[in-house]
Amino acid sequence: MATPLTADHLLKALRDEGLTVVEHPGWRTNNRNHKGPWGPVHGVMIHHTVTSGTASSVALCFNGHSALPGPLCHGVIAKDGTVHLVGNGRANHAGAGDDDVLQAVIAEREVLPPDNEANTDGNRYFYGFEAVNLGDGKDPWPAVQLEAIERASAAVCRAHGWNERSVIGHLEWQPGKIDPRGFTMPSMRSRIGTRLGTAPTPTTAAKPAPKPPATKPKPTYEPFPGAAFFKVGRNSPVVTAMGKRLVAEGCGKYSVGPGPKWSEADRRSYAAWQRKCGYSGAAADGIPGKASWDRLKVPNV
């Protein structure tokens, strides 16, 4: 648990770690703080951009896009190892993730529990670095870029007094995510621990972390309420829960919200989810059907 670094302190920490840092114009005031709290911070999250090219990737992460406003991270790590700072404060990078994973990061446990829930606001608690890579398993990771990920993560950890277990990948936080793809987070944490001097040695090996409780109940989800439920003016916490899941899946089309009343924004968002599921035409009209609803997995309210 820590107070977020100021812009000056973040910049200094990165440069002190030996990184080349570029300050994108406006990064110091580019944030989503008006949408929710920023901090206390607990760790660093690593992503890949699913893009190519430094300039376009930096612009995307600074501005965001129609479905997800920027900044989409705090720093973009280019193929040549340069870190481009694009945000300072709350950023749209982590989304909703597993509270058990958050507790493991806070405790700096060696073993992370499965990320099988999306019930916690990660944008509040994590610094985010996007590394330029297509994420297709074929796009290479240059050694200088991997070293920059290591150094950037170590810089933030060093500034807060954390060890390498405070660094996770998006795929370890939010169900269904695969980033970063192309290297493993355990191997990256090992590199970061070596840089920080906190990695266990054969004579001072860390004790195994306790296994997560085997009796934890499985998450339960809202049953399909029927297509007639979704009509203009319907006011229900189920609508809010559905909207939050659509946002977490990258399908949110909300300018404000989601809120408890079914609206045209909810219909457009659900239509985007239906298209993501492979539906088209009349089958992607934005009115939930049982098959697509069951796939969305809206938590019980």
Image (cartoon, rainbow, N blue to C red):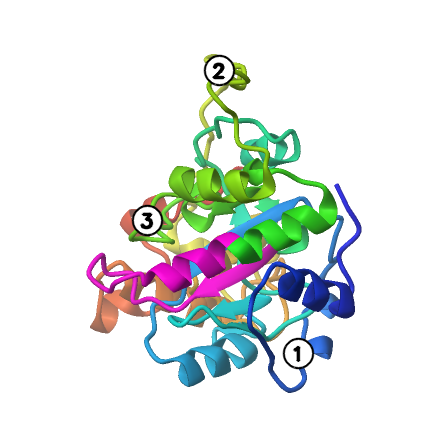
- Percent coordinates x, y for residue 123 in the rendering: 62, 56
Given the image, on which type of amino acid does mark 3 rest?
Phe
Local packing at callout 1 (Cα closer than 10 Å; few below 14, some 14-19, many 20+) is some
- Give the mark nearer the N terminus: 3 vs 1: 1
Can you identify the residue that label 3 sits on?
A: 183
Amino acid on which the number 1 mark rests in the picture? Trp
Q: Nearer the viewer, mark 3 or mark 2?
A: 3
Kindly check if marks 3 and 2 are in contact, taking CB atoms under 8 A apart as contact. no
Q: Residue at x 54, y 15 (%)?
A: 207
Q: CA distance from mark 3 to mark 2?
A: 25 Å
Query: In terms of sequence position, does the residue under pointer 3 or pointer 2 come before the other?
Result: 3
Question: Along the line of sight, which residue is nearer the eye, 218 or 171?
Answer: 171
* Cα–Cα gap, marks 3 and 1: 28 Å
What residue do we see at 32% from left, 76% from top? Answer: 52
x and y percentages locating residue 107 in the rendered image: 65, 29
The verdict on residue 138 being magenta is: yes
> Which of the two marks, 3 or 1, is nearer to us in this view?
3
In the image, the segment drawn in magenta is 127-150
Residue picked out by circle 2: 211
Q: Amino acid at mark 2?
A: Lys
- What residue sits 55% from the left and 18% below the top? 204
- Using the image, tell me which numbered label, if any, was put on residue 27: 1
Magenta segment includes 104 = no
Q: Secondary structure at mark 1?
A: helix
Specify which label sits upstream in the sequence, 1 or 2.
1
* Nearer to us in this view, 300 or 57: 57
Quadrant of the drawing holding the C terminus: top right
Instruction: Determine crowd level at label 2: few under 14, some 14-19, many 20+ residues with C-alpha closer than 10 A.
Output: few
Would you say residue 95 is visible in this rendering? no
Position of residue 60 relative to residue 148, above or below, is below
Judged from the image, the secondary structure of the residue bearing numbered disc 3 is: loop
| Residue 49, quarter of the rendered image | bottom left
